[in-house]
Image (cartoon, rainbow, N blue to C red):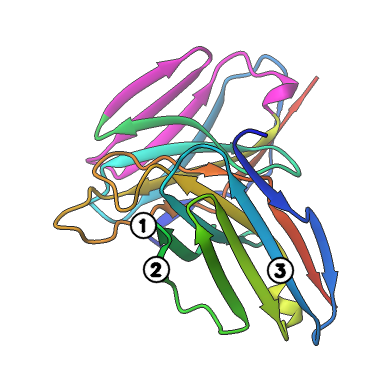
Amino acid sequence: ETGVTQTPRHLVMGMTNKKSLKCEQHLGHNAMYWYKQSAKKPLELMFVYSLEERVENNSVPSRFSPECPNSSHLFLHLHTLQPEDSALYLCASSQDYPSSGANVLTFGAGSRLTVL
Amino acid sequence: QKEVEQDPGPLSVPEGAIVSLNCTYSNSAFQYFMWYRQYSRKGPELLMYTYSSGNKEDGRFTAQVDKSSKYISLFIRDSQPSDSATYLCAMRSPNYGGATNKLIFGTGTLLAVQP
């Protein structure tokens, strides 16, 4: 496996379910991110982990709970979501954060979440 | 006012056309400018990045930054059906004193190149 891998690719859940999204990076990067992508909106940064420590939490509701057990893995735990949370959730990694350079992100293919 | 403005399109062009994609921004501190390409059912991938002003060319692609006008462009020459994708501009300021410097994205422009 190379790059950034996300599972599952598609997820349908009810408002009372609990599920998790998983991300794994094989690039040796030190920073990992969760973004939300909704139609006609810019990518929305949710969380940033640098060296396994959460360094950014952009006012994300507590029904989204991230976990970073090591520098290669990132999870997003989901519970009691709302229909408006339906979106594409993208994981990304970069060499470091913050960075003095371009801080190029490498994205996974995303997990398409539908909340019924 | 949004920090980054990008026309969402869709933009439809015939094969072989020159395509111009653009973004405007309001934050004069931005120094790093990027273009990501996102195919359907895929994540964004970095296409080009430019530091500060000027042009950068890579094959059929040219990225241009005009900091005086706060305007960036991506030109695609001899466009191909395989160029059909969403193109997202992104930009950020340098990291000063350890302050976080988030990447700010545009909404993306959907491009369709017709054979």
Q: Position of residue A110 (x, y in %)?
A: 68, 52
Front residue (pair A32, B34): A32
Q: Residue at x 53, y 49 (%)?
A: A72
Which quadrant of the structure image shows residue B53?
top left
Of labels 3 and 2, earlier in sequence is 3
Q: Position of residue B4 (x, y in %)?
A: 41, 54
Q: Where does the image place residue B13, in percent across and percent down from the top left?
A: 70, 27
Specify start and end residues of the magenta stretch as a single range. B54-83
Which is more foreground, mark 1 or mark 3? 3
Give percent across and percent down for residue A73.
57, 54
Q: Of the numbered discs in the image, which one, if any, rests on residue B102?
A: 1
**Badge 2: how crowded within 10 Å, few (<14), some, or many (20+)?**
some
Residue A39 seen from this side: no
Q: Residue at x 30, y 53 (%)?
A: A98
For the residues carrying marks 3 and 2, which lies nearer the camera in this image? 3
Residue denoted by label 3:
A20
Give the amino acid at mark 2: Glu
Above-or-below relation of B31 to B2: above
Q: In front here: B108 or A56?
A: A56
Q: Amino acid at mark 3?
A: Ser
Chain identity of mark 2: A
Q: Is residue B75 magenta?
A: yes
- Taking depth in this image into account, of A29 and B57 the one nearest to the observer is A29
Q: Is label 3 in a helix, a strand or a loop?
A: strand
What chain is tagged by disc 1?
Answer: B
Q: Where does the C terminus of chain A fall, quadrant-wise?
A: bottom right
Residue A43 disc label? none
> Are the residues tagged 1 and 2 within 8 Å (C-beta)?
yes
- On the image, numbered disc 2 is attached to which residue? A56
Label count reads: 3
Q: Residue at x 50, y 57 (%)?
A: A70
